[in-house]
Amino acid sequence: MPLSASPLPRSLALLFAVAAGLAVGNAYAAQPLLDAIAAAFSLSPGAAGAVVTATQVGLTLGLLLIVPLGDLLRRRRLVPLQLLAGASALLLVATARSAPLLLGAMALVGASSVVAQVLVAYAAALAGERDRGRAVGLVTSGIISGILLSRAVAGAVAELAGWRAVYLASAAATLVLATVLARRLPREQPEERAREQPDGRARPAGRAYLPLVASTVTLVARMPLLRVRGALALLTFAAFSTLWSALVLPLSAPPHDLSHAAIGLFGLAGAAGALAAARAGRLADRGHGEATTGAALALLLLSWPLIALLDRSLLALALGVVLLDLAVQAIHVSNQTLLLAAAGAARSRVTAAYMVFYSLGSAAGALAATTVYAAAGWTGVCLQGAALTTAALLLWWLTRPQPGRSAS
């Protein structure tokens, strides 16, 4: 049952999208700054990669240990607290004077960034059944845009004022959003008593927490839809990460020799595609989630021949980037809309489990892309992306619901 009788106001949904985009963007802002961070702490290029690793480890732990709390605690209180924790972690990064402190602070930034997933589940609950896809699409657009834009914004700010200024500015912005959301978030009625015992009496929150986290894992075994949509997320975000992890390598090398700021413009193109896909949620609301997924996977496959033309035409590359991000975003929105509609009162836990697949796919795609680029160049990277997309399309085709067969 929805937490609100009326649809989620667009202004509040936009605020959710901004907060989610900023939180997730904070976890990816270090990628264009690694050379400057390595120089500040006298790290080798190989050791600098530990900054990204620490952030991803924190993000994964946050998905498993923090996001499920949205089904136990009032999200109206949880969201501002997470944002305050994020602002504190960003401040620690900006003022860190040793590598161990930096890595620990980066892990905290990653863990706090999962407030974005709490906001997705919160928006879905507030919106109600008829507008759930619209709300999920809007907030998810904020997340994808945050990932794509963070690289460009971080690079521009760092050129003007240094890499520490990036985290100081993010800390200030996060603090402002925490204050605004603390005032704007609507009061909610719990959808369920997550800490209720079989006899109907409430157990202490501390005793409810461990079973709650454990149930996040068991949901994967109990929900076929979660397994299928999670596998689709793993494959499509591995393809997404294949492009964005390797793209800087050929563009920054001869004959292109593009600056970080110029490379960041491709992120802006990708963000435009991601924003255009927000309507996928409306299609899912109308019962077209499966068809949208199939069409988006076909579009994703079509993007790779264009991306492969990087050395011949940057315009073709830009078009391929737009198509890829539009497709990945449409699949992501469709996945979450279908899952949240089936999740009932376990929305935060289902979101957490789904996003673990997403995180694993992103990490695997990035690791494989840089290795493949070293061995087979840009052609090899594009073949990897196309192979992952083909696997996802085949998975969707084999598991799509048939008349008379349940998908949940």
Image (spheres, rainbow, N blue to C red):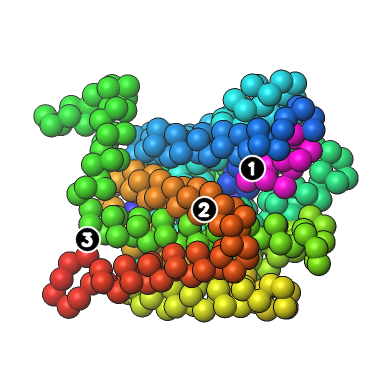
Magenta span has 227? no
360 left or right, relative to 315: left
Q: Secondary structure at mark 2?
A: helix
Q: Nearer the viewer, mark 3 or mark 2?
A: 2
Magenta span has 37? yes
Q: Viewer-proximal residue, 206 or 293?
A: 293
Give the quarter of the image for residue 290: bottom left
Tell me which amino acid carries mark 2.
Ala
Query: Quarter holding the C terminus?
Result: bottom left
Q: Earlier in the sequence, mark 1 or mark 3?
A: 1
Tell me what residue is drawn at x 61 percent, y 73 percent: 308
Q: Residue extending furthest left?
A: 199
Q: Which residue is denoted by mark 3 in the rendering?
A: 408
State the CA–CA distance, disc 1 to disc 3.
34 Å
Q: Which mark is residue 368?
A: 2
197 left or right, relative to 2: left
Tell me which amino acid carries mark 3.
Ser
Q: Residue 263: x percent and y percent?
A: 75, 60
Q: Residue extending furthest front?
A: 375
Q: Residue 302: x percent and y percent?
A: 52, 79
Q: Nearer the viewer, mark 2 or mark 1?
A: 2
* Extent of the magenta region: 28-38
